[in-house]
């Protein structure tokens, strides 16, 4: 079993603590001005994950996008192998732990999307997209016109 404390990166950031399948509580970084924004612009990977959640066309696609984002965020705080991710995220289907995990992570993803739609971050991302030939114009334009997101509890109703 992988140890949460021993797996922490030197760049570990505090955030939302969520119990995973190994029954340890793991920390997913929260968005903040110090970590994503003026001091440190959002990375291409971060923006791509946000874009995939925004553009999800159904619950199954949103579920996959949120799972990929969870893996991305865990990788920001921890040094884990592919086997470690599998052990941490392999819940018994429809168990109380799986439901709790899905809801808790969905809420965390919502926080990241809300942060990303903040006008200050928005203007920074807009400046970055101008500098990089509008690479991320699609999610920025979507956020600009759809500030109220469609929220769905991932994994619900689709099998």
Image (spheres, grey):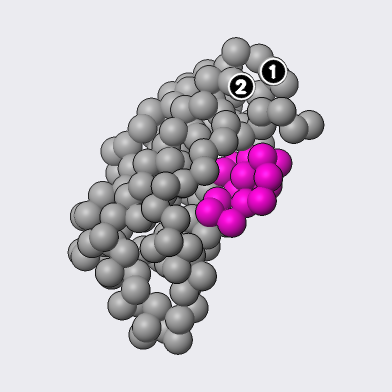
Give whichever of 135, 44 is nearer the camera: 135
Q: Nearer the viewer, residue 54 or 90?
A: 54
| Magenta region includes residue 65 | yes
Q: Main secondary structure of the magenta part?
A: helix
Tell me residue 59's x, y (percent). 66, 40
Asked whether 45 falls inside the magenta stretch, the response is: no
Would residue 31 be visible to someone looking at this image? Answer: yes
Which secondary structure, mark 1? loop
- What are the residue bounds of the magenta stretch? 53-67
Percent position (x, y) of residue 102? 56, 28
Question: What residue is disc 1 on?
Answer: 94
Q: To which quarter of the image does residue 153 belong? A: top right
Question: Looking at this rendering, what residue extends furthest in the front direction?
Answer: 145
**Residue at the image position 66 percent from the left and 31 percent from the top:** 155
Mark 2 secondary-structure assignment: helix
Tell me if residue 84 can be seen.
no
Report whether 159 appears left or right of 101. right
Q: Is residue 146 above or below residue 109?
A: below
How far apart, in angstroms, are the residues tagged by discs 2 and 1?
A: 6 Å
Residue plotted at (53% across, 20% down): 100
Location of the N terminus by quadrant is: top right
Q: Identify the mark at residue 98; answer none if there is no mark.
A: 2
Q: Is residue 78 left or right of residue 117?
A: right
Marks 1 and 2: in contact by CB < 8 Å? yes
The structure residue drawn at horizontal position 56% and vertical position 43%, both measured from the top left corner, is 66
Instruction: Please state the horizontal and vertical placement of residue 48, each as a whole percent of the image.
Output: 52, 62
């Amino acid at each position: 079993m992988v140890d949460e404390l021993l797996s922490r990166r030197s760049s570990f950031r505090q955030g939302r603590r969520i119990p995973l399948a190994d029954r340890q509580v793991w920390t997913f970084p929260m968005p903040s001005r110090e970590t994503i924004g003026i001091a440190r612009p959002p990375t291409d990977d971060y923006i791509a994950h946000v874009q995939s959640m925004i553009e999800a066309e159904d619950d199954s696609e949103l579920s996959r996008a949120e799972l990929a984002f969870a893996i991305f965020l865990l990788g920001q705080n921890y040094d884990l192998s592919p086997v470690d991710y599998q052990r941490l995220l392999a819940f018994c289907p429809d168990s109380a732990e799986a439901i709790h995990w899905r809801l808790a992570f969905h809420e965390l993803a919502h926080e990241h999307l809300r942060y990303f739609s903040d006008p200050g971050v928005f203007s920074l991302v807009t400046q970055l997209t101008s500098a990089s030939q509008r690479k991320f114009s699609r999610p920025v334009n979507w956020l600009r016109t759809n500030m109220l997101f469609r929220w769905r509890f991932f994994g619900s109703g689709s099998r």
